[in-house]
Every structure is written in structure tokens, then in C-alpha cells.
Image: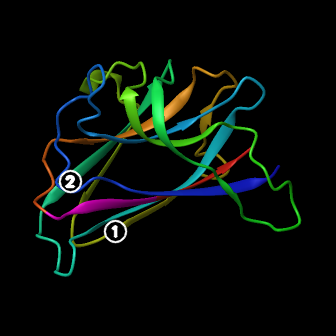
């Protein structure tokens, strides 16, 4: 199986309000499957940057939500192969980072299948190997979205997210 990496920097001062219609609000990334390929999410690395200063100390929570419709993406990051000797093109459609119509999902707390709480002055590096697997099934409507919950980010603060997936 080939491994790929994708990265995104969220908008600054992202709110903690659920996405609706064409407004992404707290949604800042959605890794989509395709008609021919699903994936296993293998690593999530996330932290906060604050422009030129030190991030304000704050408790944050990023939730992972299964999407059932891709929406209309206006910005998509093409995953990069981690091994130069493997397949160079990911089978999935990519990591969407902006939308005119947000993906279809249930954005309320009861629908989140994983939460990542951390302090803004630290970072998180979560591997999902062996028994800890996050799987996204094959299908153009399927994906795993990342949303900010609980607290809005302060002015000039953004998330830095790097994910690794395996196809």
C-alpha cells in the first residue's frame, strides 16, 4: 500500500460554529475518498501558529466527522507520495480546504467519531497503526472532515494540519 501526506493551514481566527450551506465556519479540511479508492488515515499532526508571536494559551478541540457528500470544493490539496519508489498519484480525490458548498455531514457533537483536545501552545502527533485504524470507505461521497469545536481561535491564530493516509 502506498502512503501519502497532505497539509493545510486553516484560516486565521477560525470560529467554533458548525458549517452550513456555503459557509465552512469551523470546517478547515476534508480528506475525500474516490469512486475507486478508500483510505486508512495513519497519522494526524496538528498544532497552532500565531503569526510572528507565541500562540495564546488556550484549550482547543478538533473533531473528526465522517462526510457523506463532498460538497463543492474550491481549493484541493493533492496528496504527495511519501515513498518516491511507490505510486506517485493518490487514488483519492484529495484534501479539500475551501468550499462554495460544504460537505454533507452531521456536524453536531453526537456525530463526531473522534476528538483531539490539546493546548494551543503544544502540538499533537497521533499515529493510527495496527489496532488503531481510521478507515474511510471507497466512494466519492465519503470523507473525513476536521472541524474546530468548543473555542474560536484568537486573531492571527491558525491550525497547521498534516495527515498521512494509506491506500
- Residue 104: percent from left, percent from top: 42, 18
Who's the residue at 17% across and 72% down the image? 55
In the displayed structure, does residue 20 sit left or right of residue 106? Answer: left
Along the horizontal axis of the image, is 99 left or right of 26? right
Q: Report the disc number at residue 77.
A: none
At label 2, counting other C-alpha atoms closer than 10 Å, the crowd grade (few under 14, some 14-19, many 20 or more) is some
Q: Is 128 rendered above or below residue 112?
A: below
Nearer to the camera, 71 or 115: 71
User: Which residues fall within the magenta stretch?
Assistant: 156-161
Across and down, in percent, residue 147 comes to 32, 40
Dot 2 falls on a residue whose secondary structure is strand
Q: How many marks?
A: 2
Picture disc at residue 60:
2
Of residues 92 and 21, the one drawn nearer to the viewer in this rendering: 21
At which x and y percent is residue 64?
40, 38
Q: Residue at x 57, y 24 (%)?
A: 142
Q: Main secondary structure of the magenta part?
A: strand
159 relative to 29, above or below: below
Q: Secondary structure at mark 1?
A: loop
Please tell me which residue is depicted at 65% across the width and 36% down the height of the picture.
Answer: 93
* Disc with the residue nearer the chain's start (2 vs 1): 2
Task: Tell me which corner region of the image, top left, top right, bottom left or bottom right, holds residue 49.
Answer: bottom left
Out of 23 and 153, give the one closest to the viewer: 23
Q: Is residue 4 above or below residue 94?
A: below
Residue density around tag 1, few if under 14, some if 14–19, many if 20 or more, within 10 Å: few
Q: CA distance from mark 2 to mark 1?
A: 11 Å
Task: Report the disc number at residue 123.
Answer: 1
Q: Is residue 106 left or right of residue 75?
A: left
Amino acid at each position: 500500500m502506498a502512503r501519502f501526506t497532505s497539509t493545510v493551514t486553516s484560516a486565521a481566527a477560525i470560529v467554533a460554529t458548525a458549517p452550513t450551506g456555503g459557509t465552512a465556519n469551523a470546517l478547515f479540511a476534508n480528506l475525500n475518498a474516490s469512486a475507486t479508492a478508500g483510505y486508512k488515515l495513519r497519522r494526524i499532526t496538528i498544532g497552532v501558529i500565531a503569526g510572528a508571536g507565541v500562540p495564546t494559551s488556550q484549550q482547543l478541540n478538533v473533531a473528526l466527522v465522517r462526510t457523506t457528500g463532498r460538497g463543492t470544493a474550491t481549493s484541493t490539496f493533492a496528496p504527495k507520495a511519501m515513498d518516491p519508489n511507490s505510486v506517485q498519484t493518490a487514488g483519492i480525490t484529495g484534501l479539500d480546504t475551501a468550499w462554495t458548498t460544504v460537505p454533507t455531514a452531521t456536524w453536531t457533537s453526537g456525530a463526531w467519531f473522534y476528538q483531539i483536545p490539546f493546548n494551543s501552545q503544544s502540538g499533537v502527533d497521533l499515529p493510527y497503526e495496527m489496532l488503531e485504524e481510521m478507515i474511510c470507505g471507497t466512494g466519492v461521497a465519503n470523507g473525513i472532515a476536521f472541524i474546530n469545536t468548543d473555542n474560536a481561535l484568537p486573531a492571527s491564530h491558525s491550525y497547521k494540519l498534516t495527515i498521512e493516509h494509506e491506500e
